[in-house]
Amino acid sequence: MKKLKLVLSKHAIEQARERGISINEIEETIRCGAKSLQNNKIISVYKHVKVVFKKLNNEYFIITVMIKYKP
């Protein structure tokens, strides 16, 4: 499977490090997650990860990443 071209914001890099989320988990969440739109951003949720991003041409600009908590 072809790797996605991911561009992470400084904030996303910091959040991924703090939360122990790998680049592979971010890519898997974008590929396989349930998606919704919110204010021109795409939110993808898969397993325990939530990724907020924008798709710009062939790149995925990652705004932030979060751990999805059960209610």
Image (cartoon, rainbow, N blue to C red):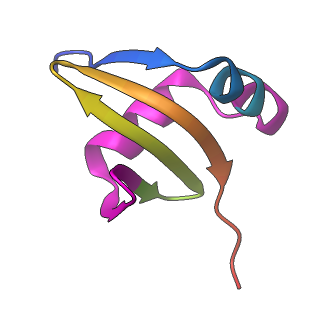
Across and down, in percent, residue 62 comes to: 48, 30
- Read off the magenta span: 16-43
Across and down, in percent, residue 17 comes to: 77, 25
The image quadrant where one finds the C terminus is: bottom right
30 versus 32 height, above or below: above
Count every numbered label the image shows and give the total.
Answer: 0
The residue shown at (66%, 49%) is 66
22 versus 68 height, above or below: above
Q: Is residue 39 magenta?
A: yes
Across and down, in percent, residue 47 comes to: 51, 59
Across and down, in percent, residue 26 comes to: 48, 34
Q: Does residue 34 appear left or right of residue 19 in this picture?
A: left
Residue 18 location, quadrant: top right
The image quadrant where one finds the N terminus is: top left
Q: Does residue 52 appear left or right of residue 60 in this picture?
A: right
Outermost residue on the bottom side: it is 71
The residue shown at (35%, 51%) is 42
Residue 21 location, quadrant: top right
